[in-house]
Image (cartoon, rainbow, N blue to C red):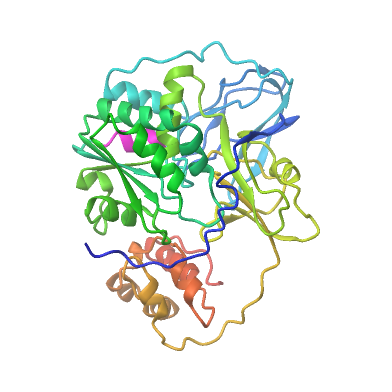
Amino acid sequence: MKRCKGIYLSHRKHTAGAETERLPLPATVILPMSMHMGAPCRPMVAVGDSVMVGQQIGETTEAFSAPIHASVSGKVTAIQEHLCANGTKCPAVVIESDGNQTIHPACQPKELHTKEALIEAARNSGCVGLGGAGFPTHIKLSAQKPMDMLVVNAAECEPYLTSDCRQMMESTADCIAGIVMIMKLMSIARCRIGVENNKPAAIRRLAEACREHPEIEVIPLSSMYPQGAEKVLIYHTTGRVITEGTLPADHGVLLLNISTCAFLYQYTQTGIPLVERRVTVDGTAVRKPCNLLVPISTPVRLLLEYAEYDAAQMKRLLSGGPMMGLPLYSVDTPICKPNNGLLAMKELPAHKQTACIRCGRCMRACPMQLMPMALERAYAQKDRKALERYRVMLCMNCGCCSYVCPASRPLAATNQLAKSLLSGNERSNDL
């Protein structure tokens, strides 16, 4: 089978062997009412209210959304406007911890016997995709089209990040139990787990755990970026092509992250919703790279201090990996549900942007077989027909084109602006 294109990066998986440590409880957390794709929530509590771990504090009636739960027990001290990392604003609930981590009485084990019960549990738990995108999980599970294949994303192809790797190593049984549960309730016959081959220990553990489940197959994949991208992973594990304008469900595929599968199983055992996250903390400005289990909405500063970062040397702070991570404006930004990594980087060498030399490296690197240099020209001319003809909407913004460009052209950023132009949401022409 012909493979998708991509690039080979230095893995820098410094924390692959670092067991997850639990961060000391923060004194205060700030819970934004928007920490997922879709509509934000509305606060259900008021200043002065006492709350417990797992108590729902953010509600929504929108289908494309997910509820928010308290990650610490304590008292609500403020409800304030919060500036999100993507530049939008939403309400946020500030909770002062009492240090007790008292679990709310509603957090009880769940017995699920139907697909509808699984969908309801996924929504009630506040579950979103834990691979970084933050797509509400119950939306994926609610697809009306029949699906015969579960593809589990365990690739973790970005450099530095190892939170999924540690999930597989430390909670192997939960990962497989979650997959089996989802397959049964969703009436899915087969499963493929895609794992990059730079995680041999995790592959062995998963394969051993799947010996009694022949319907689940562990697929070692080459360590090529962006191996974990939706269309790339599905093609490399199943051979199915997710065509332009279609979803995996249109091709009989349900795609979930390995940590999402494990969480859904854990939720049925404890009834505790999504209130904590495993986060890889690493980067060139970090002295002690580590994997930390933290309450959601813990200030980033506490994770950095635990990892002994160099505040004077740090010039760039990213949520996620170095290729698709989102720059953070402050070390006081709270950890949100999709955050699987935190990178503190020293100042990177500046590359002067020069004219395109038509070398074609961007085209040869693109997993979607696009022509970024042609898209850049079409966007500069505001040629919407050309952008459609060159299929800019297929771009997944993996950044391969920008990475390999010898002229340091901002090709991935241009593609994002081009997509905004086509959708009528363009706000600026500045790159």
**How many numbered marks have been drawn onto this rendered protein structure?**
0
In the picture provided, is 134 more to the left or to the right than 31?
A: left
Residues in magenta?
Answer: 136-143
In the picture provided, is 207 more to the left or to the right than 272?
A: left
**Coordinates of residue 240 in the picture (x, y in percent):** 21, 53
**Can I make out residue 338 in this image?**
no
* Vertical comparison of 135 with 276: above or below: below
Q: Residue at x 41, y 25 (%)?
A: 265
**Coordinates of residue 21 in the picture (x, y in percent):** 64, 35
Quarter of the C terminus within the rendering: bottom right
Characterize the magenta stretch by its predominant secondary structure: helix
Q: Residue at x 76, y 48 (%)?
A: 308
Q: Residue at x 28, y 64 (%)?
A: 3
**Coordinates of residue 28 in the picture (x, y in percent):** 73, 31
**Coordinates of residue 77 in the picture (x, y in percent):** 74, 26
Front position in the image: 428 or 285: 285
Q: Say which quarter of the image contains residue 173.
A: top left
